[in-house]
Amino acid sequence: MNLKQRLNAYERLLRLDKPIGILLLLWPTLWGLWFAAGGHPPMMVLWIFVLGTVLMRSAGCAINDYADRDFDGHVERTQHRPLATGEVSGREAVMLAAGLAICAFLLILPLNKTVMLLSVPAVILAASYPFTKRFFAIPQAYLGLAFGFGIPMAYAAFYDSVPPDAWWLFAANVVWTIAYDTEYAMVDRPDDVKLGIRTSAITFGRFDVAAVMLCYGLMLLILALFGRAHGMGWVFYAGLIVAAGCMGYHYTLIRGREGKPCFRAFLHNNWVGAAIFAGIALDFAMRT
């Protein structure tokens, strides 16, 4: 394998060719940054969190594929991943993940000690999530914890602590993650059942669609109450209405439980996160 082929394999291992994971991790981090900074996060802090999101998502992908290296070859959607095909070794994947995590830690050195302390559970959650699919009935909830940890870290960057209300924003992201990752799991359900992997799509069974929509509704309720507590205006709620419209569209895609439409619903969650962030950012911008 020449250098170009190896770099291409690394790119696919880290999913840099599929930015949806970065975006789904980035949106809630930006929600936290904007609320914590009152709508005006310093550019340096913003870039630290954006680059850190890219690095940690990439590290998480490498660890995920390492954990699933014995399964991915038996799943139609994942059988061509670099570890499954042998293009990248397990050792390379672990070294890449460790190197990216170290780079992410170096990024936060200009910030305070609380952010550094919070980075420890953030890394532990990201590294351990892939293994929860062996024993946890709803690993998507655990993924939500990992994907939402940018929120308390964002608050810590400004307050040197995490105020209690930040955890409500964190909770909204957890239920959102359960919703969209259940849609994702619905795609692989037949293969996952054969392999004995645990997912929310299997656990929820015939109530999978209802569970997704319930999680969406709970997320919107938490955000609406959070916005009210923080004196948000009509633009914020308009963003929630647009997000709700996206969720309604997702229902039309997933109700038939067919693989490709469910995957489209998962991908479309980018617009849910974007709509909510737009409402937050514009609402704060209109105050100045």
Image (cartoon, rainbow, N blue to C red):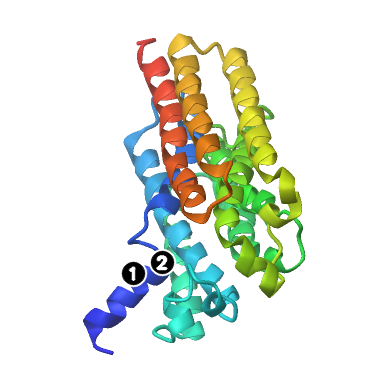
Residue at the disc numbered 2: 14
Where residue 246 sits in the image (x, y, percent)?
47, 31
Above or below, 256 against 172 in this view is: below
Above or below, 195 against 248 in this view is: below
**Residue 11 shows which numbered tag?**
1
Where residue 242 sits in the image (x, y, percent)?
45, 23
User: Mark 2–mark 1 contact, CB under 8 Å?
Assistant: yes
Task: Give the residue at the far bottom of this rendering.
Answer: 1
Picture residue at 64% right of the left edge, 55% below the top:
121
Above or below, 189 against 70 in this view is: above
Picture residue at 43% right of the left edge, 41% below the top:
268
**Residue 19 shows which numbered tag?**
none
Left or right of residue 102: residue 43: left
Task: Mark 1: give few (<14), some (14-19) or many (20+) Cα within 10 Å.
Answer: some
Res 74 visible:
yes
Where residue 10 sits in the image (x, y, percent)?
36, 74
In the image, what residue type sits under mark 2?
A: Leu
Nearer-the-camera pick, 175 or 284 = 175
Quarter location, residue 160: top right
Q: CA distance from mark 2 to mark 1?
A: 5 Å
Nearer-the-camera pick, 56 or 87 = 87
Left or right of residue 14: residue 125: right
Callout 1: helix, strand or loop?
A: helix
Task: Give the residue at the far front of this rendering.
Answer: 256
Where residue 9 sits in the image (x, y, percent)?
34, 76
**Placement of the N terminus among the 4 image quadrants:** bottom left
Picture residue at 39% right of the left edge, 84% below the top:
87
Res 108 visible:
no
Picture residue at 49% right of the left edge, 20% below the top:
241
**Placement of the C terminus among the 4 image quadrants:** top left
Quarter location, residue 127: bottom right
Task: Mark 2: give few (<14), some (14-19) or many (20+) Cα within 10 Å.
Answer: many
